[in-house]
Amino acid sequence: MLDVRQRATQARQLEGYEPFKEICAEIREEAVQLFLNPASDIDSIARAHEAVRAVETFMATIQTHIDAEKVADKKAQYRGSD
């Protein structure tokens, strides 16, 4: 298993990877267009909502890995001041 710093580094790399950001934006944009289209059926809207939620969950997990490194650094700093 990767340590906190390695996971945070990988998360930052993924977060900054342009093709990844473009795919996430594309999923969101397609969903918005579906939401705004009055001809969209309930099932399509539900699938689009699930897709957006999945992207947001993925992005939150990336941020969690980045934040875990910050917490570990703060704990190390606190322990070092004893």
Image (cartoon, rainbow, N blue to C red):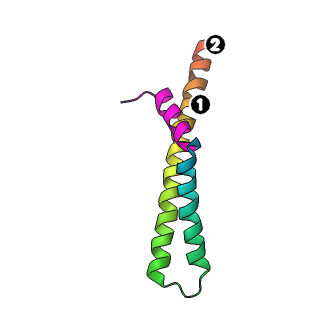
Q: Is mark 2 on a helix, strand or loop?
A: loop
What's the amino acid at mark 1? Answer: Lys
As measured in the structure, the alpha-carbon distance from the residue carrying label 1 to the one carrying label 2 is 17 Å
Q: Identify the image quadrant of the N terminus.
A: top left
Relative horizontal placement of residue 70, taking residue 2 as reference (left or right): right
Segment colored magenta: 2-15
- Residue extending farthest to the front is 19
How far across and down, in percent of the image, does residue 66 sit? 55, 36
The quarter holding residue 28 reads bottom right
Reply above or below: 44 against 71.
Answer: below
Q: What element carries label 1?
A: helix
- Please give the label number shown on residue 70: 1
What's the amino acid at mark 2? Answer: Ser
Return the residue nearer the eye: 57 or 51: 51
The residue located at (60%, 71%) in the rendering is 32
Return the residue nearer the eye: 71 or 35: 35
Q: Identify the image quadrant of the C terminus.
A: top right
Reply above or below: 45 against 53.
Answer: below
How far across and down, in percent of the image, does residue 51 sit? 47, 65
- Please give the label number shown on residue 81: 2
The numbered mark, 1 or 2, whose residue comes first in the sequence reads: 1
Main secondary structure found in the magenta portion: helix
Q: Residues within 10 Å of mark 2 (few under 14, many from 20)?
A: few
The residue located at (52%, 42%) in the rendering is 14
The residue located at (58%, 47%) in the rendering is 18
How far across and down, in percent of the image, does residue 50 sit? 46, 67
How far across and down, in percent of the image, does residue 47 sit? 45, 72
